[in-house]
């Protein structure tokens, strides 16, 4: 069936529907096609380019960088993915989400420029955002890597500074099933002679070897930068710069000082070209926001939204839940995709959850509520040290139904944690905003 090509009069939804059908596969790793089209577009810009990759923590690091740089008075573009509710969330210029009209104008331009070159949804989007950023005459671009690094479309950008926040197991079908293999893929966002920040406390040897082989200026957490803190405040120490007496970041969670340190190390590495006063750092860290990263909704019962969808993120979520005050019961609204390590995620969190409300997710990769509930049950039953109290496990067709039932069942002093996927958190947010 032939689908008509959208025009400059088409809506954003029409364009996005077209992009979803355009390429034979959702993910097609490689830079040759997207570079070919990029060369036909005016994407050159003198803006400083900070590229952020990693298994977890990259969204938080990007949000902090954007907030600090805006507080310092710079013109900043931010590109992240995926979105939670609206597609437009993926791009911000000077703190404002890009409009439908801005996206459709660039999509129309790229469609004309690509000719017979096939692009994925993500590649098309990346080109559109880079084109918008080039027109906006920015000082700094903060770009989050979509998947991996070496073959991700964002890697066509020649970064002035690259950050890898963490390396752990995820997307194994594309990146490999060991930290060494994944580290090698992610390390390719580093550039020769340019600052290469790594905030993973135990980076894989493959990352260190690649940085050395290309002559990157490698900044390692614990060697080149670090942090310290007490109950009231925290401090950052870099190679030649200290930032003391800072309030804790607005973003909650055990790993946020690690993410903040990566952002500050990047800013220190660029200080000859990017002056950032201490007050801008303080202000930016308390203003940074990022939905779905240990986000606590107002009111009772306490509700936590977290996009944790791999073992590393689940371990951090478990630690964050353990650091909270006492709650008689914890309800999980849990939805995951079929290509994720469901069992490891469940094992990390089994000791914290009393009621598992397993929700079906849409799309070909989404597990049904029944499938997920079965896997939760089997995982907990085979744990060497299962929870002392046998949890309740129920299946629901959608996140909205699971979340609604959790709210109906729990008392005001209980808590609900919504996690497992961006789709899970988005479903709960849509229910909240109805």
Image (spheres, rainbow, N blue to C red):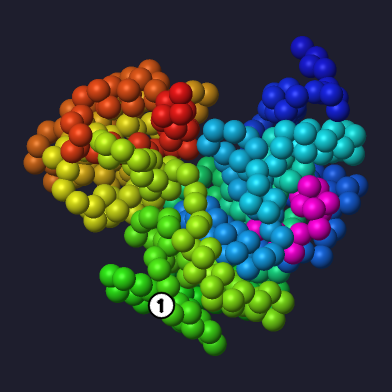
Residue 384, image x, y percentages: 15, 45
- Is residue 215 in sight in this rendering? no
Q: Residue at x 57, y 39 (%)?
A: 83
Residue 73, image x, y percentages: 67, 66
Q: Is residue 133 magenta?
A: yes
Q: 106 or 111: which is nearer to us?
A: 106
Q: Is residue 18 magenta?
A: no
Q: 45 or 337: which is nearer to us?
A: 45
Residue 338, image x, y percentages: 44, 31
- Is residue 142 in sight in this rendering? yes
Q: Which residue is mark 1?
A: 245
Is 181 situated above or below 422?
below
**Left or right for 377, reference 28:** left
Q: Residue at x 48, y 37 (%)?
A: 422
Q: Element at badge 1?
A: strand
Is 284 situated above or below 400?
below
> The N terminus lies in which quarter of the figure?
top right
Q: How many marks?
A: 1
Image quarter of residue 27: top right
Q: Residue at x 26, y 44 (%)?
A: 349
Q: Residue at x 21, y 44 (%)?
A: 352
Q: 120 or 42: which is nearer to us?
A: 42
What span is colored magenta in the figure? Answer: 130-142
Residue 210, image x, y percentages: 60, 70
């Amino acid at each position: 069936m032939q689908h008509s090509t959208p025009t400059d009069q088409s809506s954003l939804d029409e364009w996005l529907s077209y992009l979803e059908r355009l390429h034979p596969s959702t993910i097609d790793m490689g830079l040759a096609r997207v570079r070919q089209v990029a060369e036909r577009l005016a994407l050159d810009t003198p803006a400083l380019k900070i590229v952020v990759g990693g298994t977890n923590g990259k969204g938080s690091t990007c949000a902090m960088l954007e907030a600090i740089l805006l507080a310092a008075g710079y013109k900043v573009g931010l590109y992240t993915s995926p979105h939670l509710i609206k597609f437009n969330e993926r791009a911000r210029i000077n703190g404002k989400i890009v409009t439908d009209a801005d996206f459709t104008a660039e999509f129309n331009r790229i469609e004309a420029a690509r000719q017979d070159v096939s692009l994925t949804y993500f590649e098309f989007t990346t080109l559109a955002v880079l084109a918008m950023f080039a027109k906006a005459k920015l000082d700094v671009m903060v770009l989050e890597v979509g998947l991996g690094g070496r073959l991700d479309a964002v890697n066509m950008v020649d970064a002035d500074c690259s950050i890898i926040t963490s390396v752990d197991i995820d997307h194994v079908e594309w990146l490999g099933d060991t930290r060494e293999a994944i580290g090698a893929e992610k390390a390719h966002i580093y550039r020769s002679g340019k600052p290469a920040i790594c905030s993973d406390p135990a980076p894989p040897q493959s990352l260190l070897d690649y940085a050395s082989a290309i002559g990157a200026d490698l900044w390692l957490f614990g060697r080149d930068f670090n942090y310290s803190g007490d109950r009231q405040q925290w401090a950052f120490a870099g190679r030649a710069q200290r930032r003391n007496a800072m309030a804790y970041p607005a973003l909650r969670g055990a790993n946020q000082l690690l993410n903040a340190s990566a952002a500050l190390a990047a800013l220190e590495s660029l200080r000859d070209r990017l002056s950032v006063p201490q007050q801008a750092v303080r202000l930016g860290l308390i203003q940074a926001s990022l939905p779905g990263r240990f986000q606590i909704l107002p009111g009772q019962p306490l509700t936590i939204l977290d996009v944790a969808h791999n073992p590393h993120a689940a371990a951090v979520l478990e630690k964050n839940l353990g650091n909270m005050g006492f709650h008689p019961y914890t309800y999980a609204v849990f939805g995951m995709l079929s290509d994720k390590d469901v069992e490891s995620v469940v094992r990390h969190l089994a000791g914290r959850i009393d009621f598992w409300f397993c929700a079906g997710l849409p799309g070909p990769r989404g597990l049904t509520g029944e499938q997920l509930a079965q896997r939760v049950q089997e995982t907990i039953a085979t744990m060497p040290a299962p929870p002392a109290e046998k949890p309740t496990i129920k299946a629901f067709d959608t996140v909205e139904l699971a979340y609604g039932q959790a709210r109906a069942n729990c008392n005001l002093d209980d808590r609900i944690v919504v996690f497992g996927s961006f789709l899970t958190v988005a479903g709960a947010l849509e229910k909240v905003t109805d």
